[in-house]
Amino acid sequence: MFKKTATGSLRLWRAYQTVATADQAKRVAAYRAVDDILSSSHRVVGLGSGSTIEFALDRIAQKPELHSIAYVPTSFQTKHLILKHGLQLGSIDQYARISVTIDGADEVDRDLNAIKGGGACMFQERLVAQASETLVLIADDRKKSERLGTKSTRGIPVEVIPAALTTVKHSLETMFPHGCVQLRMATPSDKAGPVVTDNGNLVLDCQLGPIADPQAIYRKIKLVTGVLEVGIFDMAQVAYFGCINPSRVDIWHKSTSSATAQRN
């Protein structure tokens, strides 16, 4: 019995260390992106969703010169964090054009194609990203990928209108017979049943393996009746990846599709 308990404790400790290291890397990326990208000259800034954006907001809150900016959230969670930090809250209804948006990603390839939607907010994220002059992605270096679809454990998130769930799932399974399409379920500690988006919809996670043409897959899925949004994005101009041991930030630019490593 003691041996099992000790083994379980070791696994728990290792899991904690992995999470702690990932959080450090996310913080490094978020802080560097805020320092490099944002300035008092920006009037409106979009903010994405997820744990990495929490670190970006922490950094913004530390810089008084950024407090006069209106921040447009892509989720209820981000809206709450903006208000918690005492920052100016904006909305896409108020601002048709946004100077820059900072958002997280689940996976990013060398061409800055990205899989997003781990937080089930991809419709709002695309709405804000498309209104933005510049889209900046931030993540830890585990999210870097040579080919999209090889790192994200869930696959491609697809936001689906509830009434169309069965038909959309069938269509995707027919479209991708070698893939795996699953309804995303909430964790038992949060709620029973499936994950529900801020729009009241459901999420299908599509594991398709390596993706040769991300935009072709995006268009194919988006045309299915009942699909609201697909978590494949190609609008980013730059991506910041936080690395630990040694501490540095890898910056990938859209224009060159190349990576440059810089130490903090």
Image (spheres, helix red, strand yellow):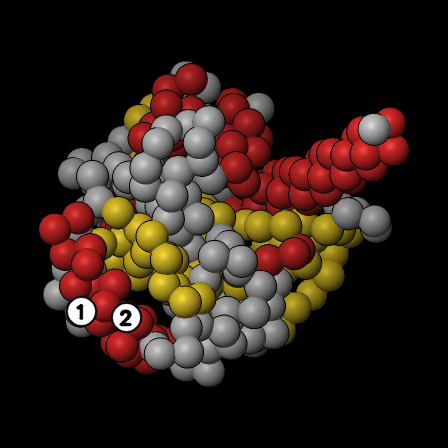
Q: Is residue 195 above or below residue 174?
A: above
Residue furthest front in the image: 1
Q: Does residue 252 appear in the picture of this structure?
A: no
Looking at the rendered image, the disc whose residue lies closer to the viewer, 1 or 2, is 2
Q: Is residue 126 above or below residue 11?
A: below
Q: Amino acid at mark 1?
A: Val
Q: x%, y% of residue 162?
A: 17, 48
Secondary-structure class at tag 1 = loop
Q: Is residue 176 above or below residue 196?
A: below
- Quick one: 125 or 15, which is closer to the camera? 15
Mark 1–mark 2 Cα distance, whole angstroms, equals: 8 Å
In this figure, which residue is indicated by the disc labeled 1? 224
Residue at (41%, 73%) from the top-left corner? 179
Residue at (44%, 48%) from the top-left corner? 118
Q: Does residue 212 appear in the picture of this structure?
A: yes
In this figure, which residue is indicated by the disc labeled 2? 172
Q: Residues within 10 Å of mark 2 (few under 14, many from 20)?
A: some
Residue 178 horizontal side relative to residue 26, left or right:
left
Kindly indicate whether the residue at mark 2 contacts the one at mark 1 (C-beta within 8 angstroms). Answer: yes
Q: x%, y% of residue 260?
A: 69, 65
Q: x%, y% of residue 73?
A: 33, 36
Q: Is residue 166 above or below residue 41?
A: below
Q: Amino acid at mark 2?
A: Leu
